[in-house]
Amino acid sequence: MNIYKITNIETGLSYIGKDQRDCEYYMGSGLLLWNSYRKRFGREDLDDSKKSHHKWVYEQNKILGYYEKTILCECDDAKELCALEKKYISEDILNNKRSILS
């Protein structure tokens, strides 16, 4: 399980979230984040609930480099993961007013 940050390289906007499955190609679930993917990759049919779409976005981004995904921390406990997500979001809001949150 991990806390990640996805940053749009062009705009500097970022999204912080948690991944309980440790899926390398998981690309978040925030509405604004996925609207950004739809616009950037020109695919209105992208759906964050489909694993295949996460993989497609991940693979396209590896080629084009529009977004940077950073693992902020890892942990083994779901309750701790939720607390850490809140901590990192709060810190990001204080340090960077250009974050997008779901």
Image (cartoon, grey):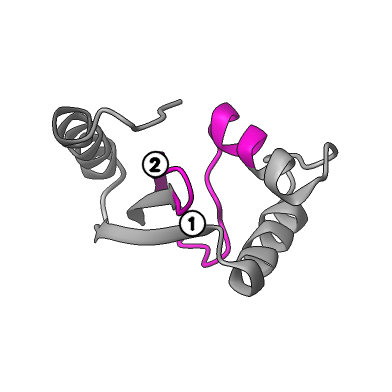
The answer to which quarter of the image holds residue 74 is bottom left
What secondary structure is marked by label 1? loop
| Mark 2 burial class by Cα count in 10 Å: few <14, some 14-19, many 20+ | many
102 or 7: which is nearer to us? 7
Task: Please state if 20 lies on the left or on the right of 83 as rendered.
Answer: right
List x then y, in percent, for residue 58. Answer: 62, 63
Residue of label 2: 14
Task: Please state if 3 lies on the left or on the right of 41 as rendered.
Answer: left
The stretch drawn in magenta includes residue 74: no
Count the marks. 2
Give the residue at x 58% y 64%.
25
Instruction: State yes or no: discs 2 and 1 in contact (Cβ < 8 Å).
Output: no
Q: Which of marks 2 and 1 is nearer the N terminus?
A: 2
Location of residue 15 with respect to 9 vertically, above or below: above
What's drawn in magenta, residue-wise? 8-36
The stretch drawn in magenta includes residue 15: yes
Q: Identify which amino acid the numbered label 2 is placed on.
A: Ser
Q: Identify which amino acid the numbered label 1 is placed on.
A: Arg
| Mark 1 burial class by Cα count in 10 Å: few <14, some 14-19, many 20+ | few
Residue of label 1: 21
- The residue most toward the front is 10
Give the residue at x 41% y 30%.
100
